[in-house]
Image (tube, helix red, strand yellow):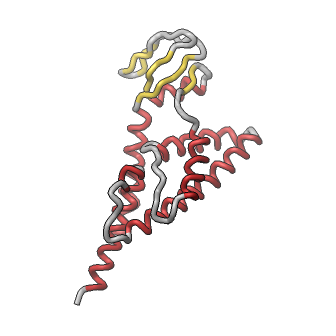
Amino acid sequence: MSQLEKKPHEIESLFHDREYSYRMAFVKVLVKKPIQAIEVGSFRLPEASEGAVLDLPRWIANILQSMGSVELQEDSIDSELFRAVTRERIHSNLQLNPIREDFYLRLREYLHRVHQSAESDRNAQQEYDRALVSTHDLITMRIGKILQLSALSSIPSDLFTKITPEERMLFEKVRELVNEWRRTLLID
């Protein structure tokens, strides 16, 4: 098996590990309906009345949100996606707009949720289609910039503050290949 054939598993593994951490991370929720105290594994969900704000693991918050019991207290990813696409178009080829470290994880979760709703809701299907087009646009623009940056002899000092861990892995793998190609080409 060549080195290139092993690479996808590293990327898959990174996504899997980050997704697990993302789901276990705590998120603030606003209680919309009273919640009874309950133990879920090693986590104890406290009793909460309407209007209370709780910190819950995201996976529990998502279940309670789907039941209509809570509302997540974070920026909407669909508006964040639109802003990211707009900003990426404005920046030059070698400038990346900073995005949150968990951006792709939140986006992936959002796309999955909207896709499920789209099966029975025409408006959700249109929302999903728009989000998918914007996602492809954003990924294409950011990958293009990452590829250009990976070929530079020196990288911008703030690059790693502007990219996600998934993009960093892509950058490092491509940069490694570019540098190996250069070394091979320039050997006397």
Query: Residue 106 at what x, y percent from top left?
Result: 51, 41
Query: Residue 26 at what x, y percent from top left?
Result: 42, 28
Q: Establish if 81 lies above or below 31.
A: below
Question: For the point 73% across and 46% down, which residue is it?
Answer: 126
Q: Establish if 47 lies above or below 103.
A: above
Question: For the point 34% across and 62% down, which residue is it?
Answer: 172
Q: How many badges with numbers are in the image?
A: 0
- The N terminus sits in image quarter: bottom left
Q: Establish if 166 lies above or below 175.
A: above
151 and 165: which is toward the camera: 151
Q: Write down the quadrant of residue 177 in the picture.
A: bottom left
Question: For the point 44% across and 22% down, which residue is it?
Answer: 55
Query: Residue 133 at what x, y percent from top left?
Result: 64, 55
Q: Establish if 112 lies above or below 181.
A: above
- The C terminus sits in image quarter: bottom left
89 and 173: which is toward the camera: 89
**Left-right relation of 123 to 178:** right
Question: For the point 54% across and 27% down, which residue is it?
Answer: 72
Outermost residue toward the left? 188
**Left-right relation of 77 to 172:** right
Outermost residue toward the right? 122
Query: Residue 131 at what x, y percent from top left?
Result: 64, 48
